[in-house]
Image (spheres, grey):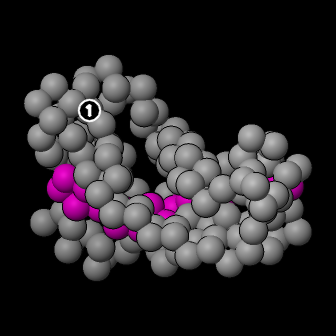
């Protein structure tokens, strides 16, 4: 997580039996599901609920995903995902997340780049103005002058 004070959100969850594999730990792909839920919460925290974009047939699709696993979660563990918007361009944004267990132990780190997609044509498109406006209003607070000059000029 690199941008101090960047738009961020928390997502809390619990591991259920169906989340685990034969070894009794969370199946590695389940983290991707939880990371998506955390990104949806991040959009909510920005005042731009995903349903707003769905109504206009706008989607945000992962085009790059990095996950570093540090420790497993097991059945009945509780966890929290801290997600933060760390970069934005005209047609994509990056969300970095940390998943920690209830005692604060790092479970995994993730970085996801999402491209904006016109779902009627299945083609890339610019980020919606409503999302850009929300970010522009708070850009100096969140990212400082350098981010502003690089990304919005």
| Residue 49 in view here | yes
- Give the image location of residue 65, x and y in percent: 40, 64
Give the mark count.
1
Residue highlighted by disc 1 = 58
- Give the image location of residue 89, x and y in percent: 22, 61
Q: Nearer the viewer, residue 144 or 120?
A: 120
Whether 59 is drawn above or below 34: the answer is: above
Q: Furthest-front residue in view?
A: 22
Whether 99 is drawn above or below 2: the answer is: above
Which residue is depicted at the point 74% across and 41% down?
Answer: 18
Count neighbours of disc 1 (C-alpha within 10 A) and say few if under 14, some if 14 to 19, many if 20 or more.
many
Left or right side of 2 for 125: left
Q: Quadrant of residue 95?
A: bottom left
Whether 122 is drawn above or below 144: the answer is: above
Q: Nearer the viewer, residue 50 or 100?
A: 100
Q: Is 66 included in the stretch rendered in magenta? A: no
Which residue is depicted at the point 34% across and 53% down?
Answer: 62
| Secondary structure mostly taken by the magenta-highlighted segment of the chain | strand
Q: Nearer the viewer, residue 42 or 97?
A: 97
- Give the image location of residue 82, x and y in percent: 63, 61
Q: Quadrant of residue 85?
A: bottom left
Q: Is 88 included in the stretch rendered in magenta? A: yes
- Give the image location of residue 17, x and y in percent: 81, 43
> Callout 1: helix, strand or loop?
strand
Which residue is depicted at the point 56% across and 54% down?
Answer: 29
Quadrant placement of the C terminus: bottom left
**Magenta segment range?**
77-96
């Amino acid at each position: 997580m690199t941008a101090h004070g960047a738009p961020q959100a928390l997502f809390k969850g619990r591991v259920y039996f169906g989340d685990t594999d034969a070894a009794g730990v969370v199946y590695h792909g389940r983290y991707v599901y939880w990371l998506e839920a955390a990104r949806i919460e991040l959009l909510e925290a920005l005042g731009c609920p995903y349903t707003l974009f769905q109504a206009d047939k706008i989607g945000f699709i992962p085009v790059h995903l990095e996950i570093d696993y540090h420790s497993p979660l097991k059945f009945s563990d509780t966890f929290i995902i801290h997600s933060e918007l760390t970069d934005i361009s005209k047609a994509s944004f990056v969300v970095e997340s940390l998943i920690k267990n209830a005692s604060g132990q790092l479970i995994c780190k993730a970085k996801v780049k999402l491209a904006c997609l016109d779902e009627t044509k299945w083609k890339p498109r610019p980020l919606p103005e409503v999302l850009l406006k929300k970010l522009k209003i708070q850009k100096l607070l969140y990212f400082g002058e350098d981010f502003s000059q690089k990304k919005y000029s």
